[in-house]
Structures are given as structure tokens and as C-alpha cells.
Image (cartoon, helix red, strand yellow):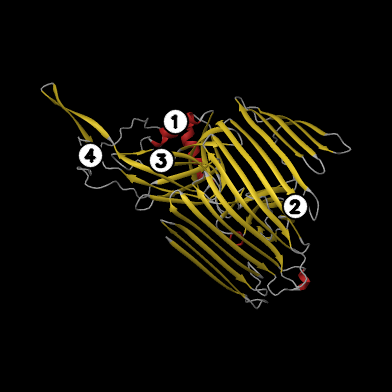
């Protein structure tokens, strides 16, 4: 599969320059490759201006699941070297890596940030080797990292090495419990001739949701400098929350931080709160607020500078520290987006952008992480039936395989949900996914008379840059037909293609796409009936299903794109996924 996009721009206003954007992507059995080139002259007053950008990436599977990765990026600003703009930044980055599935990877990285003006104010580079090994299990995950490299400043004339060792673990025995721990040791030399500094740090976190709406959280972090100028820092944050059935929230927060040496032994804060939701016709002040934040690369912890972020019609660039600011933001809903081409098509953000922000009485601060995107693909494959001796054979009664076109495939991770239809060969492909735990399932397979899907669900954890493959089997159903002659059973024969027998109350409506859904904010399970383009349609179906089953319903908006919002119809509140899935199965199998 190959895709190519070309855009040409010409400034018909005061500008005198042109712009061009070219992107190319190809996917083959051996891997994938993608490249993007963008040029916008200094006199072009369009969406882009005064920049040259080139990025390329390639992933090759010489022997699956072994893979080779290569990525390159080169970006220039201030193309005509205008000295009144203080700097003419150029950022170059390349990475070479070898990996085995999501268990082991070795990568070499090089970053250089330089000022191209005659009297540059910075010229620095980072070069390192990163080794990662781990096991990303669905309930238990362990990841070990070792990074070694050198940081160089050519203007100041110094270079110093650094080493970093890290161990990251997570454990989630149930949706109501999650635990994690990290250990890290870092060794680096200070500027010029200062001695090397060793620093050890670690953290422990836990979250537990109890029956009845009570939730407990604890997070502890500590670090200590072991050599040179000794310092110690500890941080402890604990919270206990309880949400009552009538919507009130009671919470206790305790936070303590200690830093030594310091004139203050410790900093302790204690907050007790009780929140009561009120629906009063209050009119807030129209005084403007701000939206500020920081854009960071989650893999190496470095700031993402010169990234373009857009809020409605305004655009800003992140500074060398990765920070950005939108001043004078009026109260109300706003949509935050970023320039995907300027970052690279192989990356996504956490949280996902576009992101709806509702500015009310206070300003908003955000932390945005940049991670390599993952992909999931697979197919629904027909499996021929077996004869009496166990050998596979084609169906004798239908003469052809089932129609695998237009099956509905659903991919979910918490509140995130994506759906797509299979092609004529039963294939599907999801791309641009953020890392995390995902659930994949086949919906709408009822028209495959005589076949069942096994398995119909798959759960897995995607790491940054992963390419996960999951295949489902369409297996012929079997039923026993007993031939009776004069009251005696003569033979038992296995016959294929018997459609499934369903016995659902006729008054229960049918919902082919019904699925169990976990609501993170309220820590409960519900049933997603379907999503609709309008709120009225969602409320109509929610009411219809709620009356038929005697269960409470709700409707919530979900932003699909920056300009499109769909409305989900939700049914019931359940303490376990099994209870919600049972209702969803009943709706999918109800009589049409």
C-alpha cells in the first residue's frame, strides 16, 4: 500500500513566496517507510512560514519479530538569516535501532541544536545509546533501561559523559487496583571541571478503588545525590476520596516534601474538602485567562522546541524549554491542536491532540508528552471444516468461504475508541495509536451464518513504536441432526452451516455494536449502545433501551475530530465488566 500527498501554496496577499508540502508513505510485507518534506519561504504568509523541514523513517522486518528502525529529522527556521530575530535555529536528529518485538531494543540517538547566525548563541549536541528490555504483560509489566552518552557544548568548549540506569514496573491485578515502582541511578559530570555527580532516585505509587465509591491514592518519590555536593529530596502525596450516591464528594489530601540542605526542614500541607454540585444560574466574569504548558519527549525527557501549537485561530511556538503560552483566552470551550507535519507523522501526543479545553474561572496548565505512535493490524481468516478423518476440506454445502467484508472491528483503551470495517479480504489496520493497554474485538459478525469468530477479543499493551498483529478465525459451526425411523434413532450426522439459535425477548431492541465500557472518572462499567451524530438521536435510543430493560441511561459527547462531536448512548451502571458484557451480549443477540 502506497500513499502520497502534495500541497502547493502561493501568497496572493502581501507575501511574495510560495510553499510546498510533500509526504509519501508505503507499506509492504517487509516493513514500512515514510517521508515528509515541507518548505515555506520567509515571505509566505500562510499556515507555515519561514521554515524548511525534512523527516524520514523506516521500519524493516528482516525476520519477524526482529525489526530494524531508522529515523531522521532536519528542521531550519529563519531561512534568510535575519539577525534582528536573534537566532536562526537548526535541529537535526537521527536514530538507528534494532528490536525484538516489544521485549528488547537497542537504539543509538543523536541530537544537535545549532544557531546558524554569524555569531551563534548556542551549538550543543547529545549522543547516546539506549538499551531497553522488558515484559509488557496485560497485568504485570517490567521494563529495564540503560542509557550512556555524551553531552557537548561547542561554544563553551566542554563535553561530559552521562549514564542512566532505570527499572520500571507496573502491576494491575484488577481494574480497581494499580501499583507501580521505579528505580533510577544517574551519573553525569558537571560543567567544565566539576567532579562527577551520582544521583539515586525511586518512586512508589498505588491506586485502589473500594466498593461504594471510595478511592485511595498514594505516591512517594525520593532522590539523593551520593557524591559531590550532597542533596536529598523526598515527596509524599496521599489522598482519600469518597463519592456519595447523590453526587457529593468528600476528600482528604496530605502532601509533604523535604529538601536538604535547607533552612526549612519540611513542607507539609493538608487539605480537607467537601464538594456539593450546584446548578445555579451564575454568570462568571468575562475576564480572560491563560493556557500554558510544556511539550516534552517522553522517551528521553528532552523538551520539544519550535513545535507549532494552535488554539482556535491562534498559533504559538514552543521555546527551547518546550514551554508555550496562549494569553488572553476567553472563557468557554477551545480546541488545542498541534502541527503534525512539523513533529513527524510517526509520533502522537499524550494526551491526544486535538484536545477540547473548557476555560472557566481559572487558567489551565498542561503537560504534553510526545511518543512514537503504534499500529495494530490483522485479519479475520476463514478456517475450512474437517472431514471424518480430521483432514481439512472446503464446505460442501456452500461451496465458498464466508463473506468477511464489512465486519466491524472495535479498538478501545479507556475512553478512547476507534472502529473500522474490514476490507474485501477481511483485513483491518489501525495506526497512529498512543501507547497503553488496548482491547480489540470483532462486532457485527451475526451475518456470518454457520460461522463463529474465535477468539472474538484480544487484549494487549502497546509500547512506543510497536506494530502489533492480531488475527481472528472464522470457524464453521456444527449442529447434530438425529435421523429417526419408526421411533428409533438410526444415525447422528454432523451438518455445517446451522445458523445460531437465539432466544431473546422480542420486546428488547437489538444493538449490533453494543459493548461493555469502563468509565475511568466514575470507576464503573456501563454498556455503550452506539454513537450518533446528534444528541437527540442518542437520547431517543437511550430512552428506548432503558425502558425495555429497566436500567438508567445517560448521553455523553465525545470529540472525534477538532470539528466533529458524536454522542454516545450509555446504558446502566455495573460494578464488574462481566455484568456489563452480559447485557451487551443480550442486546447484540436480540431479535431484529
- Horizontal relation, residue 257 to residue 457: left or right: right
Residue 290 circle label = 2
User: What separation in Å lies between label 2 and label 3 (alpha carbons)?
Assistant: 44 Å
User: In the figure, 439 relative to 507: above or below?
Assistant: below
Q: Position of residue 218 (x, y in %)?
A: 69, 31
Q: CA distance from mark 4 to mark 3?
A: 35 Å
Is disc 2 surrounded by few (<14), some (14 to 19) or many (20+) residues within 10 Å? some
Q: Name the residue tied to disc 4.
A: 391
Q: Which one is nearer the viewer's eye here, 27 or 4? A: 27
Q: Residue furthest bottom?
A: 16
Q: Secondary structure at mark 2?
A: strand
Q: Residues within 10 Å of mark 4 (few under 14, many from 20)?
A: few
**Mark 3, residue position:** 512
Q: Quadrant of residue 283?
A: top right
Quarter-wise, where is residue 155 in the image?
bottom right
N-terminal of the pair, mark 2 or mark 4, is 2
Residue placed at 27% from the left, 42% from the top? Answer: 384
Q: Under tag 3, what secondary structure?
A: loop
Numbered disc 4: secondary structure:
loop
Which image quadrant: the N terminus?
bottom left
Of callouts 1 and 3, the N-terminal one: 3
Name, please, the residue furthest toward the top.
487
Amino acid at each position: 500500500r502506497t500513499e502520497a500527498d502534495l500541497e502547493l501554496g502561493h501568497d496572493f496577499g502581501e507575501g511574495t513566496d510560495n510553499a510546498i508540502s510533500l509526504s509519501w508513505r508505503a507499506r509492504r510485507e517487509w516493513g514500512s517507510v515514510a517521508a515528509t518534506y515541507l518548505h515555506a519561504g520567509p515571505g509566505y504568509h500562510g499556515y507555515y512560514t519561514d521554515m524548511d523541514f525534512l523527516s524520514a523513517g523506516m521500519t524493516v522486518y528482516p525476520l519477524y519479530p526482529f525489526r530494524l528502525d531508522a529515523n531522521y529529522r532536519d528542521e531550519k527556521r529563519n531561512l534568510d538569516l535575519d539577525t534582528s530575530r536573534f537566532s536562526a535555529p537548526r535541529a537535526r536528529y537521527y536514530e538507528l535501532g534494532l528490536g525484538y518485538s516489544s521485549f528488547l531494543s537497542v537504539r543509538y540517538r543523536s541530537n544537535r541544536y545549532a544557531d546558524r547566525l554569524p555569531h551563534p548563541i548556542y551549538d550543543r549536541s547529545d549522543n547516546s545509546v539506549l538499551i531497553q528490555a522488558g515484559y509488557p504483560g496485560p497485568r504485570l509489566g517490567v521494563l529495564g533501561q540503560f542509557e550512556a552518552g555524551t553531552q557537548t557544548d561547542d561554544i563553551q568548549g566542554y563535553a561530559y559523559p552521562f549514564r542512566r540506569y532505570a527499572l520500571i514496573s507496573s502491576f494491575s491485578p484488577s481494574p480497581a487496583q494499580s501499583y507501580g515502582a521505579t528505580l533510577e541511578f544517574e551519573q553525569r559530570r558537571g560543567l567544565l571541571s566539576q567532579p562527577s555527580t551520582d544521583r539515586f532516585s525511586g518512586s512508589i505509587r498505588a491506586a485502589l478503588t473500594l466498593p461504594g465509591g471510595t478511592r485511595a491514592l498514594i505516591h512517594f518519590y525520593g532522590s539523593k545525590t551520593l557524591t559531590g555536593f550532597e542533596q536529598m529530596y523526598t515527596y509524599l502525596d496521599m489522598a482519600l476520596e469518597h463519592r456519595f450516591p447523590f453526587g457529593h464528594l468528600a476528600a482528604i489530601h496530605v502532601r509533604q516534601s523535604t529538601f536538604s540542605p535547607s533552612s526549612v526542614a519540611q513542607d507539609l500541607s493538608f487539605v480537607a474538602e467537601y464538594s456539593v454540585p450546584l446548578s445555579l444560574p451564575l454568570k462568571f466574569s468575562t475576564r480572560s485567562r491563560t493556557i500554558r504548558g510544556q511539550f516534552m519527549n517522553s522517551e528521553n525527557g528532552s523538551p520539544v522546541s519550535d513545535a507549532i501549537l494552535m488554539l482556535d485561530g491562534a498559533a504559538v511556538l514552543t521555546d527551547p524549554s518546550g514551554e508555550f503560552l496562549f494569553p488572553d483566552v476567553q472563557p468557554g470551550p477551545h480546541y488545542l491542536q498541534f502541527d503534525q507535519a512539523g513533529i513527524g507523522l510517526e509520533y502522537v501526543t499524550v494526551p491526544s491532540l486535538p484536545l477540547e479545553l473548557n476555560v472557566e474561572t481559572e487558567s489551565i496548565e498542561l503537560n504534553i508528552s510526545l511518543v512514537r505512535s503504534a499500529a495494530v493490524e490483522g485479519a479475520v481468516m476463514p478456517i475450512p471444516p474437517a472431514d471424518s478423518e480430521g483432514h481439512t476440506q472446503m464446505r460442501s454445502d456452500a461451496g465458498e468461504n464466508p463473506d468477511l467484508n464489512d465486519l466491524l472491528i472495535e479498538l478501545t483503551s479507556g475512553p478512547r475508541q476507534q472502529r473500522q470495517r474490514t476490507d474485501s479480504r477481511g483485513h483491518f489496520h489501525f495506526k497512529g495509536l498512543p501507547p497503553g493497554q488496548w482491547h480489540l474485538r470483532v462486532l457485527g459478525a451475526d451475518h456470518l451464518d454457520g460461522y463463529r469468530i474465535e477468539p472474538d477479543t484480544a487484549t494487549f499493551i502497546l509500547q512506543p513504536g510497536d506494530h502489533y498483529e492480531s488475527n481472528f478465525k472464522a470457524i464453521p459451526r456444527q449442529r447434530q441432526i438425529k435421523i429417526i425411523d419408526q421411533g428409533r434413532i438410526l444415525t447422528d450426522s454432523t451438518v455445517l452451516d446451522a445458523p445460531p439459535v437465539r432466544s431473546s425477548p422480542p420486546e428488547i431492541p437489538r444493538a449490533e455494536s453494543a459493548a461493555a465500557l469502563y468509565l475511568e472518572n466514575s470507576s464503573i462499567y456501563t454498556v455503550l449502545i452506539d454513537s450518533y451524530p446528534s444528541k437527540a438521536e442518542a437520547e431517543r435510543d437511550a430512552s428506548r433501551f432503558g425502558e425495555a430493560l429497566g436500567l438508567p441511561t445517560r448521553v455523553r459527547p465525545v470529540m472525534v475530530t477538532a470539528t466533529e462531536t458524536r454522542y454516545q448512548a450509555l446504558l446502566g451502571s455495573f460494578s464488574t465488566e462481566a455484568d456489563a458484557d452480559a447485557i451487551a451480549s443480550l442486546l447484540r443477540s436480540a431479535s431484529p
